[in-house]
Image: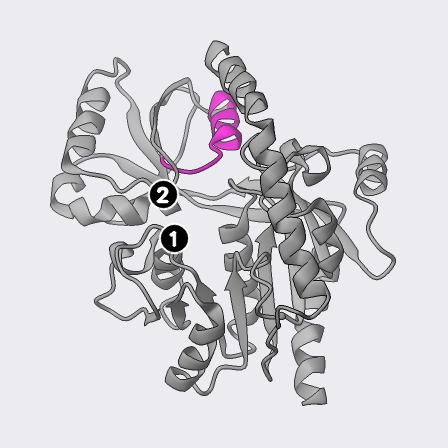
Amino acid sequence: MFSNFFLRSFRILLLPFALVYWAVIALRNWLFDKNILKTAEFGLPLINVGNLSVGGTGKSPMVEYLLVLLKDQFRVATLSRGYKRKTKGYALADDDTTALEIGDEPMQFHLKFPDVPVAVGEQRIEAIPQLLHDKPETQAIILDDAFQHRSIKAGLNILLTDYNNLFTRDFYLPTGDLRDLKSSYKRAEIIIVTKCKADLSEEERKKLVKEIAPLPQQHIFFTSIQYGSLYHIINNGVTRLDDDTEVLLVSGIANPRPLKKWLEEYSSSYSLLQYADHHIFTIDDLNDIRKRFENMEETKKIILTTEKDAVRLVKFRQAIEDLPVYVVPIRHHFLFKEEDKFNKLITEFILNFKAQS
């Protein structure tokens, strides 16, 4: 608690830098709005999943949700920046690709959806033509975390904002977490408030809608996190999390709070090994994890990690195959029975785009 108070106090001291940052991004957006900086369009459906802030709002699970929804009906691909990879430029994942080459999130997509083309490239305006050259049969592309990259105009923008840190209540970096103007939400066709309470009331929903103030043409949805069955990182064996299980949570994600809250409810106790977001695990980290696990007192105990962390741990296959390292998948669960409405918006966007072209 003290460290959180210190961090908040320190970030307030950075307010002058936040004002400079705000001025820079305001100027940049104005240049795009006035068409001084140019935006490119492509002749196929582009679905952009993004946010206005740094940190976890659930972009990767939303990309996966869209892949599950679309992959059997359309030839869909994904394009990401490939954050914290050790390579540069455009790359298309294949059977020999590693997370170090394309980044942990694209690697996660590649492992879970091996038939879907997964590409990375910092300059998306250059990467899209290269992807289409490599995969000319592509009918739609999901752009992962490209909302603020206005050099490309996506036909459908899905903007995510965390229920616990709404963009309306946030401030600009480095005092807050915003990396784009609050007013940029107006560029989205769909707004999703993520990580909501599963029992979010209709009254609170109305208050949140009023606070966000969507434009008449915008659609707003609310989702909660739904955790799936735990599976072993190597052999995919499934286990249950009982109330007598002690858990060592290994986390290198931006926002582990929802996962910690879930563990408080469903495990007897847990301890946390917290690493920086997108942390590249080393053999020393693995030794620390093993040591912490061996010092746990409960007879029934496991190591738990996220899917994003798992793709960075699996390189130690031989060293961890004897450990009970389990992965917890997550997905978006739409509240207020609006999943079908959301699904229809997505599929009709692609179908109508194809019909017009």
Q: Residue furthest left?
A: 318
Magenta-highlighted stretch: main secondary structure?
Answer: helix
| Point 62% across, 56% down: residue | 28
Q: Which residues are magenta?
A: 252-265
Between residue 340 and residue 27, name the one nearer to us. Answer: 27
Across and down, in percent, residue 283 comes to 14, 36
Quarter of the image for residue 217 reads bottom right
Q: Residue at x 66, y 57 (%)?
A: 29
Mark drawn on residue 83: 1
Classify residue 170 as left or right of residue 319: right
- As rendered, which of 158 and 186 lies closer to the eye? 186
Q: Is residue 342 above or below residue 193?
A: below
Residue at mark 2: 278
Which of 90/20 is in front?
Answer: 20
Q: Are marks 2 and 1 in contact (CB under 8 Å)?
A: yes
Tell me residue 14's x, y (percent).
55, 26
Residue 224 visible in the snapshot = no
Residue depicted at x 70% and y 58%: 30
- Crowding near the residue tagged with mark 2, few <14, some 14–19, many ≥20 C-alpha atoms within 10 Å: some
